[in-house]
Amino acid sequence: MKKMYNISVIGQSNTGKSSLINYLSKKYVTAESNKLQTTRINLHNKIKINNLEINIIDTPGISLVKKDLLAESMKKSYVKTLQSIDLVILMIDVNSKDLNYEESIMNLLLDDCNILIAINKIDLMENNHDALQKFTDIINDKFHKETFPISIKSEVGIDNFLETISKLLEKQPPISNESLIPKNNQKLIMQEIIRGVIVDYTHNELPYDTAVLIDKLDEKKSLISLYVSIYVSKDNQKKIIIGKGGSMIKNIGSTSRKILEENFNKKFFISLNTIVKDNWKNSYSILKKIGYLD
């Protein structure tokens, strides 16, 4: 039986978790953005590092403050995943103002959990090495874990980081020896890709208050047809999604189609419908249909 290791990438939203996975897999499977909590589900991808079979998991950027049903489901998924993980990569933004969030996250981890810390976006400090060293020292003193300053954007420090990962995994057998990739998660990934496109297109106009649900998926030999509902909380958010003369929702649809076709090697037809639903983040039925709840 082939060894299958499971790695979880954790940390605050927008620290580069999705960027790291996309860099390693060369696939757009998570929602990359500078918005808060752009990934809401555990998204998985199989990769190889030095011939080691690895299932790498992008965990949600959970909120430790929000108490709505969506936030609680994300936290539950987060903790559940960590129980069968061989290695945890904690991503930290080099511009982090404090480490309270990271400290709270570290408290959720098991005592015997293998943890590596990646300080990402060091390209932003390329002319300030003293500040970078000071921040790295603070991380080391606080968490006492091996720390790697990297830049995914500039591909700095990545090779050494990956070499350490492979050497660490080679020293131990996998905890479960099975991939944690859930079955039938194709729909979830499609929804998350579309939602990521929405976040990218709306920039600062639209707060973190959207959800995507594929109401109907019709798959034929060479064509997948998606009939999609986009949930927002307010009427003005719907207007932003639609755009002037329908321009925004048209761009969202065309870009989503392109990305989906690249990943699934099939033609896509996408029909988008925007629905205003106040307090959808506390709606059990909506969250369950989307796949955020078991």
Image (cartoon, grey):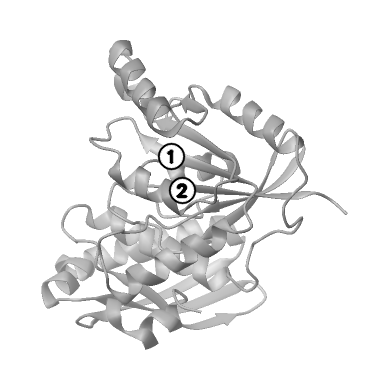
- Rendering coords of residue 212 (x, y %): 37, 73
Question: Is residue 102 positioned above or below 252 on the image?
Answer: above
Q: Is residue 274 visible?
A: no
The residue where tag 2 is placed is: 10
Foreground of the two, 46 or 270: 46
229 horizontally vs 289: left or right: left
* Label 1 close to label 2 by CB (< 8 Å): yes
Q: Which class describes the residues within 10 Å of circle 1: few (<14), some (14-19), or many (20+)?
A: many
- Specify the quadrant of the image occupied by residue 195: bottom left
Q: Which class describes the residues within 10 Å of circle 2: few (<14), some (14-19), or many (20+)?
A: many
Residue that lies at the very extreme toward the bottom in this rendered image: 285
- Rendering coords of residue 233 (x, y %): 19, 76
- Which three-letter amino acid code belongs to the residue tagged 1? Met
Question: Is residue 184 positioned above or below 133 on the image?
Answer: below
Question: Is residue 148 positioned above or below 84 on the image?
Answer: above
The earlier-in-sequence mark between 1 and 2 is 2
* Element type where label 2 sits in the image: strand
**Numbered marks: total:** 2
- Rendering coords of residue 45 (x, y %): 61, 53
Foreground of the two, 140 or 56: 140
- Rendering coords of residue 194 (x, y %): 40, 64
Determine which of the numbered discs, if any, sits on residue 216 in the image.
none
Foreground of the two, 244 or 167: 167
Which image quarter is the N terminus in? Answer: bottom right
Q: Residue at x 48, y 66 (%)?
A: 77
- Which three-letter amino acid code belongs to the residue tagged 2? Ile
Q: Residue at x 23, y 64 (%)?
A: 247
> What is the CA distance from the residue labelled 1 to the residue labelled 2?
6 Å
Determine which of the numbered discs, if any, sits on residue 91 in the image.
1
